[in-house]
Image (tube, helix red, strand yellow):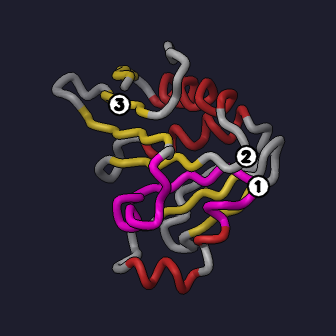
Amino acid sequence: MQQLHTASAEDTIRLGQKIGYKVAPGDIITLHGSLGSGKTTIVKGIADSLQIADEITSPSYTLIAEYEGRIPLYHMDLYRIDSLEEFELLGAEELLYGSGVSIIEWAEKIEQLLPDNCISITFCIDAAAEREIKIEGIQEVLTL
């Protein structure tokens, strides 16, 4: 596990870019943390490194946003999902095992469906208002 700190949105985007250069088709990234902790911000950096030109926003109301780039990106926000069955009804499970990278905010809601080899990123805001970011599942050391 790697533990990093970012002091700004720009730092978090840079970290996302570094992660994005290391992902491959079929990778699943799970994002954990409270509202406003940096989950969508890191997705912006990952999308940038995947050469996605579209603006990245949280798909809170649409639940799933699909982007075309060097590798397709499936950005899911499960904040409004109440059950595993509701996720299955969306048909999103096939995206998890598709040819793109799946990034899932609030992934703990579908934990039973996820493989063991996911990249897991957990966000906390510390006393100095910096983001403490714990990353599991990426072999290379990431630095800012």
Q: Secondary structure at mark 1?
A: loop
Reading the image, the residue beneath label 1 is 99
Q: Secondary structure at mark 3?
A: strand
Mark 1 to mark 3: distance in Å?
Answer: 26 Å
Instruction: Where is residue 9? Give x, y as percent.
Output: 47, 31
Is 103 covered by the magenta stretch? yes
**The magenta segment:** 95-116
- Residue beneath the point at 30% across and 25% down: 130
- Residue beneath the point at 53% across and 57% down: 58
**Tag 3 and tag 2, C-beta contact below 8 Å:** no
Instruction: Where is residue 18? Give x, y as percent.
Output: 61, 24
**Tag 1 and tag 2, C-beta contact below 8 Å:** yes
Reading the image, the residue beneath label 3 is 134
Q: Secondary structure at mark 2?
A: loop
Reading the image, the residue beneath label 2 is 25
Instruction: Where is residue 117? Give x, y as percent.
Output: 50, 44
- Residue nearest the observer in this picture, 37 or 74: 74
The residue furthest left is 127
- Residue beneath the point at 38% across and 62% down: 111
119 relative to 103, above or below = above
Locate residue 22: give its quadrant: top right
Is 27 covered by the magenta stretch? no
Mark 3 to mark 2: distance in Å?
Answer: 22 Å
**Residue 91 numbered mark, or none:** none
